[in-house]
Amino acid sequence: MSWQKEQDIRFDKWVDQCLVPKDKYLDWGSPLMNQALRGAEGGTSILIGGAPNHGKSTLLTSTILTLLEKNSDVMVLDFTIDDSYSKRVAQYIANMSSIVINDIIFAHSSMGPVERKRFGEANEKFKNWIKQDKLVLFEAVTEGDDGEVSIQASSAFITSAMREAKKAYPNRKLVVAIDALNDVDISSKQRAFSELDQEKTIVKDIHRAIISTEAVALITSHLRKNESRRPTLEDLKGNSHLAYCGKVAIGVYNDSKAKHGRSDIMWTEEAKDGTKVQMPILEAHFLKSKTSDFNGVICFQQWPALGRVVEPDDVYVQKTFKELVYRSV
């Protein structure tokens, strides 16, 4: 194929896409997320950085479930490198069924009839997503029936899976989740002389695949030296080369985790027996964005035991959360 013909085809495809009426490329399910990520179309890398155990994976899995619920033409590749396949599925089912993760993991022995019904409905929906290849999960290492071990945490495997998915489903919007970037290995055929060189090589490989497959990538990264304060863009740049080449960088912070539960930045949930329980707020600080002019913070209500975060619909509630955050800075 000549260069001219290839350029004509690609330009015509771009025009066709532009002429399709749309409010956004993906529906992120909540007002502020849609405002912040409205321009996050194919080829966009979104970095989610934060200290360990502050809620990066919870934000990631909650976002994935929302994308699957709100977008019929989406396909998600979830590379769960931090956790096992079974734990990741338990996190999803807990979120979907409103049953705490430990009850899911320990054979739901304490569930009553209502919980068992919710558990069954969540399982059925999740199984349908898997059957339709709308959600494909990968873990760091798998072992086949023949005993052959497959390393799925390498940049070579991740980029190959992305290209295969795009080839198999060219008309679907591809979303790639990598949790976490710090644990991705360099391809055995490549050489890197330092940890920094290795990380840059991995990021470049994955970033090229994101662009070529027109994927939207959600990638978490652990901040190594942050001292449990709210992350800055410099923190993210100091921990991941993706903060430089990605289009969006989000710093995650959980004041309750940072202060071991002694936080004023909490929200109150009323339990079934009428008691009021203090719950954490997950802060998502948009430190860099080339997809919109949004540069603020989105405060999510968090249910740690359910592996769930939700952006409140009430503007007043969101405003109150932000006032608590900014007052403490």
Image (cartoon, grey):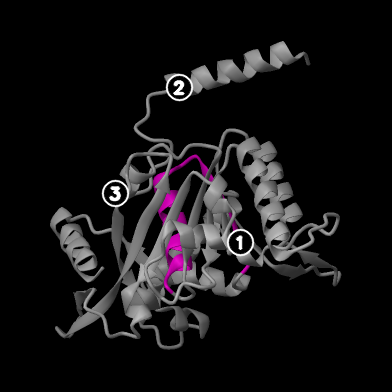
Q: Decide whether residue 77 is among the magenta residues.
A: yes
Cα distance in 3D space between marks 2 and 1:
32 Å
Judge whether 311 appears above or below 88 on screen: above
What residue did someone put label 3 on?
Answer: 32
Helix, strand, or loop for circle 1?
A: helix
Magenta residues?
Answer: 54-81
Q: Nearer the viewer, residue 318 or 264?
A: 264
The residue under label 1 is 181
Disc 1 crowd, CA 10 A, few/some/many (<14, 14-19, 20+): many
Question: Dot 2 lies on which element?
Answer: helix
Q: Earlier in the sequence, mark 3 or mark 2?
A: 2
Q: Which residue is at the front of the view, 99 or 140? A: 140
In this view, which residue lies farthest toward the bottom?
Answer: 110
> Mark 2 or mark 1, which is nearer to you?
1
Query: Residue at point 53% right, 21% down?
Result: 14
Where residue 169 sits in the image (x, y, percent)?
Answer: 63, 38
User: Could you tell me which residue is drawn at 40 percent across and 79 percent down?
Assistant: 100
Residue 125: tell me if it is visible. Answer: no
Side of 320 relative to 117 (left or right):
left
Which sits earlier in the primary sequence, circle 2 or circle 1? 2
Q: Quadrant of residue 116?
A: bottom left
Which element is circle 3 on? helix
